[in-house]
Image (spheres, rainbow, N blue to C red):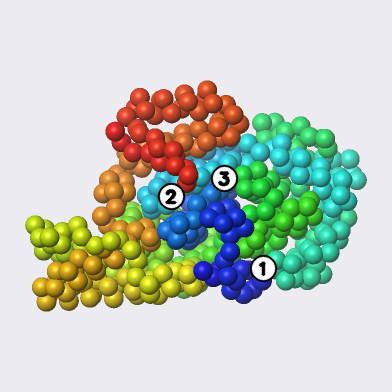
Amino acid sequence: MQLYDSKAQALRDFVPLEPGQVGMYVCGPTVQSSPHIGHLRSALVYDQLRRWLSYRGLNVTFVRNVTDIDDKILINAKGSSEQWWALAYRYELEFTAGYQRLGILAPTYEPRATASITEMQTLIAALIERGNAYPAADGSADVYFSSASWAAYGALTHQSPGNMEAAADASPRGKRDPHDFALWKAHKEGEPTSAAWPSPWGVGRPGWHIECSAMAARYLGDRFDIHGGGLDLRFPHHENEMAQSNAAGSEFANYWVHNGLVNVNGQKMSKSLGNSVFAAELLDQARAIVVRYFLGAAHYRSTIDYNDGSLAEAEAALERVESFLDRADRRLAGTRFAGSGVEVVPDEFAAAMDDDLAVPQALGVLHDTVRAGNAALDAEDLHAAASARSEVLAMSEVLGINPLSPGWAVATDEPAMVALSALVERLLGDRNLARENRDYAAADRIRDELVAAGITIEDTPSGAHWSFD
């Protein structure tokens, strides 16, 4: 398998650091407002990659964080009766519901930034000790990364510091260099005291970039296989993540993978243009499996364009798959070919997926197989039709668009099911965190409460999965 590494700016053979194991960290949402189509597209890309790696027999530890403390969260909560943490949690549930409706697998771990403050402070202290960070000289509690102290700064995006934009994540008053970025931000007058933590440098909260470095290391170690995220995160977020982690002595990510963005009717989606398409709005326009097909049909590194005909085209394409499977099941029922065939993807499909996750070519193989299966049914070649059916199921399962999958059979689009899924997934996340912190009593209590409510929990190497009794 080959993946395009943004740092190398080239395709690289994908070789896991540990045979049979893959550690993947993906930047999750900053829960400041409702999720939009770009958030769904990004999450879906890494779900496809994770599913393919798993199909290839690799055990994937998948970490996707939640940034639940940030300037924008505090700003959006200011002036309302809602606490900043309540606002963040409310939007976090919206993200979880959107992921659930699209059939995106739950992460192995989904840490919140506010649960890793200690790890962030430890990382900042190490950077200060190494001479790569400094407390502001103005007496505030601000701490900055010294860009000039790290010769490799700019290596991810292939920029020299002189050509970079100045860091705009904090006031320049205490900086030695405009490109220095905030690791710790002093508590400011007017901000809620609940959004500040004590530290060796004074009361404050972490900067955005240090959060992901600390959480990735906490759950995946100092070196892991894949770091993913949207193309818009390459600079400054991922550049700064890599610099501070490397400067602290961590090798960090072995491959940097970035997905393309989303346009709306040929224009970049932005608040200023007023053309944002929110997840709930998109999912109300078509079946969730159709939305997944649309968002996942293009190559992950390309920009996709959402327009009025996008979902209709996806619906028509998916209906061809559904029609063949329905026709095959009806014709094969009661024959010796019913349920026969091994659900293995064709070699052409595997070659496409191994080629930097070339989903458009993989979908081409899927639809070619559907056509061949229909032709076999027309010719009464039931053996060939059964083989085609099995291959179609295997390919669509890998892509998460198998119409016969139990996940789509449940009415996940109903509001009650969406709400239940979000709550169960959050409880499972709390249970994972309790187990990480060796609070087994709390973890067992959460499991017992779910079981008492009729939810079956199955612990697997890829995380906890739930179903109804």
Identify the image quadrant of residue 180: bottom right
Label 3 crowd bin: few (<14), some (14–19), many (20+), radius 10 Å: many
67 relative position to 276: left or right? right
Tell me the number on the disc at residue 66. 3
What separation in Å lies between label 1 and label 2 (alpha carbons)?
A: 27 Å
| Residue 95 horizontal/vertical position (percent) | 47, 47
Asked if one can make out residue 419 in the rendered structure from this viewpoint, the answer is no
What amino acid type should be assigned to the residue bearing mark 1? Lys
Tell me the quadrant of the picture where the C terminus can be found.
Answer: top left
Q: Nearer the viewer, mark 3 or mark 2?
A: 2
Identify the image quadrant of residue 73: top right
Q: Residue at x 29, y 53 (%)?
A: 405
Q: Nearer the viewer, residue 269 or 214?
A: 214
Identify the image quadrant of residue 424: top left
Most extreme residue toward the right is 137
| Residue 153 horizontal/vertical position (percent) | 78, 63
Q: Residue at x 14, y 73 (%)?
A: 381
| Residue beneath disc 2 | 105
Which numbered disc flags the more N-terminal residue, 1 or 3? Answer: 1
402 relative position to 112: left or right? left
Secondary structure beneath label 1: loop
Which numbered disc flags the more N-terminal residue, 1 or 2? Answer: 1
Q: Residue at x 51, y 69 (%)?
A: 1
Q: Residue at x 23, y 75 (%)?
A: 371
What amino acid type should be assigned to the residue bearing mark 2? Leu
Asked if one can make out residue 283 in the rendered structure from this viewpoint, the answer is yes
**In this picture, is 381 found above or below 295?**
below
| Residue 230 horizontal/vertical position (percent) | 56, 61
What amino acid type should be assigned to the residue bearing mark 3? Val
